[in-house]
Amino acid sequence: MTQPIRILHLEDDPNDAELVAMQLSAEGLTHDLVRVKSEAEFSAALDKHTFDVILADNSGPRFSGREALALARKKHPAVPFLFVSGSLEGEAAIAAMKSGSDGYVVKHRLSELIPAIQHALDTKNK
């Protein structure tokens, strides 16, 4: 049996968080998902646990995905970081990649989540 992939998920919307969790399970990914909703929870999770990958919504009411990316890169620069967002397309997606994310998946195409996670993990492990 393979070790579960430890995933930190920053998402303030419980419905979107549930959709991501369901997609991970539906695809058969062995995982341990920790969902956080705020900057304080995100920072505490990074301090307390080791993660294999970080997923974050691009826009939050008080803490953006870009702020999360900066904090994650400061605390754990080698951990792959993927945006999972309904609002990240076109120029915003390019800007996210330039700011150091390892990829992004738009929420209406969650079928691309597992391949994106696997690609990010493979790329970081080379």
Image: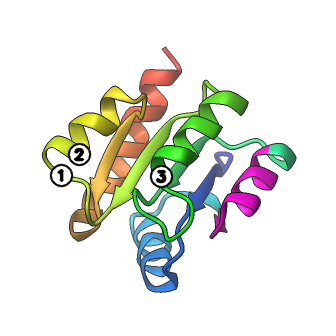
Range of magenta residues: 34-46
Q: Is residue 75 above or below residue 67?
A: above
Q: Which residue is mark 2?
A: 92
Q: Which residue is mark 3?
A: 65
Secondary structure type for disc 3: helix
In this rendering, which labeled residue sits more in front, label 2 or label 1?
2
Residue 62, quarter of the rendered image: bottom right
Residue 5 in the image, given as x and y percentages of width and height: 61, 48
Q: Is residue 77 left or right of residue 57?
A: right
Decide if residue 59 is in sight here.
Answer: yes
Q: Is residue 76 visible?
A: no
Image marks 2 and 1: residues in contact by CB distance under 8 Å = yes
Along the horizontal axis of the image, is 32 left or right of 117? right
Inter-mark Cα distance, 3 to 1: 14 Å
121 over 68 or under it: above or below: above
SS type, badge 2: helix
| Mark-to-mark CA distance, 3 and 2 | 12 Å
Q: Which comes before the other along the chain, label 3 or label 1?
A: 3
